[in-house]
Image (spheres, grey):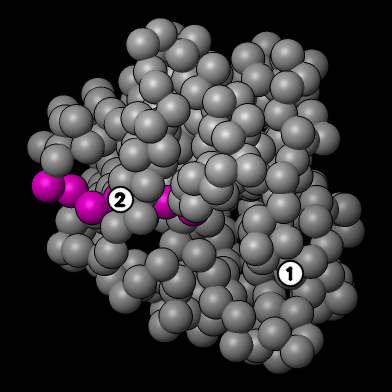
């Protein structure tokens, strides 16, 4: 049903990952500060340009809601930044102009529609800058529900047990069809499943402490009798780790004083279907499904819980008692 969507999206995500890795290897991606004080790089812009170009060329009626916009690059004093992004995109599409790059980036400024794509061109920009984990996350949403998700994790090892193994994987999940993991550069995929058998549960959490209430997470581990320290990864690679059984659950608990904060849809859409189609469960902290029908924020949801499914109710009950 979604064969053409998958083909177009996979090609674009792989091209975006190629650009991101070229930029990082060249060490040509200084971080600029956005209006919300979060970082953005040449690679963020280039990745979004490549993917939005592909989607709008093939699916011109589809809306795209992406993290970045080109407002910074349109400013005359930032012409050098626009040129730097263009030079990187030209490594994939040689005849690209700065004007085209800016137009492609801004194709990601769409609004909620019955069918739309949501994109994080580099999820985990701080991890990317540090040389750690990051992800390129793309999802197709229809009628408020994610139908297709692709996570490219260029620095995630092929096998959880061998972190020094070859790196670069893709998770591809389609509603009702399971989740597959591929090497980033070829199509020899394998089905992945969550882990139901581990007795001593293994949580996974963000590297950045500002993303979730670490004290509450520690209390949750104590309540559940967990003795293993949490894995820590940047980006939606955490969802991939749960999907392939490397970890058992991932929780985001709003920090004290930020109870009204709501998550961005592009930070969770692709990852959520990856876990669900691997046999797991993803809800908010009240046990409600994530609602992608209302805007760029998950305004009807409070926090995030992704698990192997078997322990989901137990986790929700423990969180409610914190």
State left or right for residue 216 relative to residue 41. Answer: right
Above or below 64: residue 43: above
- Residue 265 image position (x, y, % from top left): 44, 62
Residue 320 shown in magenta: no
Q: Residues within 10 Å of mark 2 (few under 14, many from 20)?
A: many
Q: Is residue 196 visible?
A: yes
Above or below 231: residue 101: above
* Image quadrant in which the N terminus is located: top left
State left or right for residue 18 relative to residue 322. Answer: left
Residue at horizontal 19%, vertical 30%?
A: 57
In front of the other: label 2 or label 1? Answer: 2
For this orientation, the residue located farthest to the front is 76
Residue at horizontal 41%, vertical 38%?
A: 102
Residue at horizontal 35%, vertical 55%?
A: 109
* Image quadrant in which the C terminus is located: bottom right
Residue designated by label 1: 212
Label 1: state its secondary structure: loop
- Residue 181 image position (x, y, % from top left): 46, 27
> Are circles 2 and 1 on residues that touch, CB within 8 Å?
no
- The residue range painted magenta reads 61-68
Residue 64 numbered tag: 2
Above or below 283: residue 317: below
State left or right for residue 102 relative to residue 7. Answer: right
Q: Is residue 138 visible?
A: no
Task: Write down the quadrant of residue 143 in the picture.
Answer: bottom left
Q: Residues within 10 Å of mark 1 (few under 14, many from 20)?
A: some
- Residue 104 image position (x, y, % from top left): 35, 37
- In the depicted view, which residue is nearer to us: 81 or 269? 81
Q: CA distance from mark 2 to mark 1?
A: 27 Å
Label 2: state its secondary structure: strand
Residue at horizontal 40%, vertical 8%?
A: 94
């Amino acid at each position: 049903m979604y064969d053409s969507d998958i083909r177009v999206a996979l090609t674009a995500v792989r091209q975006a990952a190629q650009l991101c890795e070229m930029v990082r290897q060249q060490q040509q991606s200084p971080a600029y500060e956005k209006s919300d004080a979060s970082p953005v790089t040449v690679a963020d812009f280039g990745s979004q340009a490549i993917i939005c170009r592909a989607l709008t060329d093939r699916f011109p009626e589809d809306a795209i809601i992406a993290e970045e916009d080109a407002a910074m690059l349109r400013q005359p004093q930032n012409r050098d930044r626009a040129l730097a992004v263009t030079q990187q995109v030209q490594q994939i599409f040689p005849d690209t102009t700065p004007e085209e790059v800016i137009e492609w980036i801004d194709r990601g400024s769409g609004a909620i529609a019955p069918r739309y794509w949501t994109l994080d061109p580099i999820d985990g920009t701080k991890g990317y800058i540090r040389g750690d984990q990051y992800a390129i996350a793309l999802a197709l949403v229809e009628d408020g529900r994610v139908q297709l998700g692709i996570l490219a994790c260029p620095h995630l090892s092929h096998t959880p047990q061998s972190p020094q193994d070859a790196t670069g994987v893709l998770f591809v999940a389609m509603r009702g069809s399971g989740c597959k993991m591929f090497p980033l550069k070829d199509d020899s995929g394998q089905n992945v499943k969550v882990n139901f058998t581990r007795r001593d549960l293994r949580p996974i959490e963000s590297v950045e402490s500002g993303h979730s209430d670490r004290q509450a997470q520690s209390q949750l581990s104590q309540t559940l009798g967990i003795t293993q320290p949490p894995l820590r990864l940047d980006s939606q690679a955490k969802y991939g780790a749960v999907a392939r059984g490397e970890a058992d659950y991932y929780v985001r608990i709003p920090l004290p004083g930020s109870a009204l904060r709501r998550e961005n849809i592009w930070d969770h859409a692709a990852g959520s279907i990856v876990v669900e189609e691997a046999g797991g469960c993803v809800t908010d902290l009240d046990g409600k499904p994530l609602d992608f029908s209302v805007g760029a924020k998950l305004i009807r949801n409070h926090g995030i819980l992704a698990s192997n499914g078997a322990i989901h109710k137990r986790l929700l009950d423990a969180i409610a008692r914190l």
